[in-house]
Image (cartoon, rainbow, N blue to C red):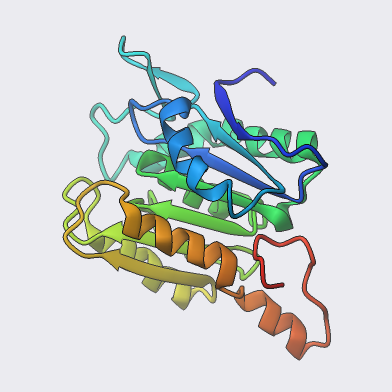
Amino acid sequence: MKHDHFVVQRPDKPAQQLLLLFHGVGDNPVAMGEIGSWFAPLFPNALIVSIGGAQPYGSTGGRQWFSVQGVTEQNRQERVDAIMPVFIDIVRYWQQQSGVSPQATALIGFSQGAIMSLESIKAEPGLASRVIAFNGRYASVPEVATTATTVHLIHGGEDRVIELSHAVAAQEALIRAGGDVTLDIVEDLGHAIDDRSMQYALDHLRFTVPKHYFDEALSGGKPHDDDVIEMI
């Protein structure tokens, strides 16, 4: 399946986890790959790939998933839905190529990449076990959610591109719908990722136990041994 991508890390042995990164509007997979380099030392057995948006962004050489020209609260969902099958196919392609299951897949996005990651779980529940959304939002908040995916919202407190209120609304909607979600607010940070944002993300992947583990334990089940969490 042909698409723009940059492999940040490919382990020598078969991958145990799959971390897919998705950049913001006008960026590129190589630049977003720098974020992936933070995860590589802590997840040496993970295949880490930065994925480029499916559409060109003007003549800059950057990429995007959907155009933000004239985007509104009314038409954003339509634009997301139009490109979502391509996004989901790319995630499944890398799961197939790596042999890694959805239970050991994490989608990590910034801005528009976070929007697509969040919306993909809404469109295809169970596509991945974790979503890390840096300064993102839903096109429209979900009315239904499962604990198959743990969503980690990490947002700049001073973001003026995607207001913090969108992350708060996402958290509230997921809780209402019975989902599994965390929200970390990075004080004095705008529309960006900094060291504090990254530490939240790394800590969640390593130490936050998904809610569905507790549900499975209560029902007598056992957690999967390939989830993206070191302690399990």
Q: Quadrant of the C terminus?
A: bottom right
Q: Residue at x 58, y 41 (%)?
A: 20
Q: Residue at x 79, y 68 (%)?
A: 224
Classify residue 166 as left or right of residue 126.
left
Q: Which residue occupies the extreme top position in the image?
A: 59
Closest to the observer, 198 or 84: 198
Near-viewer residue (173 or 183) = 183
Q: Is residue 225 left or right of residue 193?
A: right
State the image coordinates of residue 53 (x, y, percent, origin top left): 47, 27
Seen from this angle, which residue lies furthest front?
41
In the displayed structure, would residue 76 be above or below residue 227? above
Q: Is residue 229 above or below residue 192?
A: below
What is the quadrant of the N terminus in the image?
Answer: top right
In this rendering, the answer to whether 200 lies above or below 207 is above
Residue 208 lies, in percent from the top left, at 55, 73
Left or right: 29 in relation to 165 = right
Report if residue 142 is visible in the image: no
Quarter of the figure with residue 148: bottom right
User: Camera-side residue: 108 or 169?
Assistant: 108
Residue drawn at point x = 60 percent, y = 52 percent: 106
Nearer to the camera, 111 or 46: 46
Residue for point 74% across, 90% down: 218
Percent x, y of residue 125:
64, 56
- Count of labels in the image: 0
**Is any atom of residue 81 visible in this view?**
yes
Query: On the image, which quarter does residue 228 sit in?
Result: bottom right
Q: Position of residue 43 (x, y in %)?
A: 63, 52
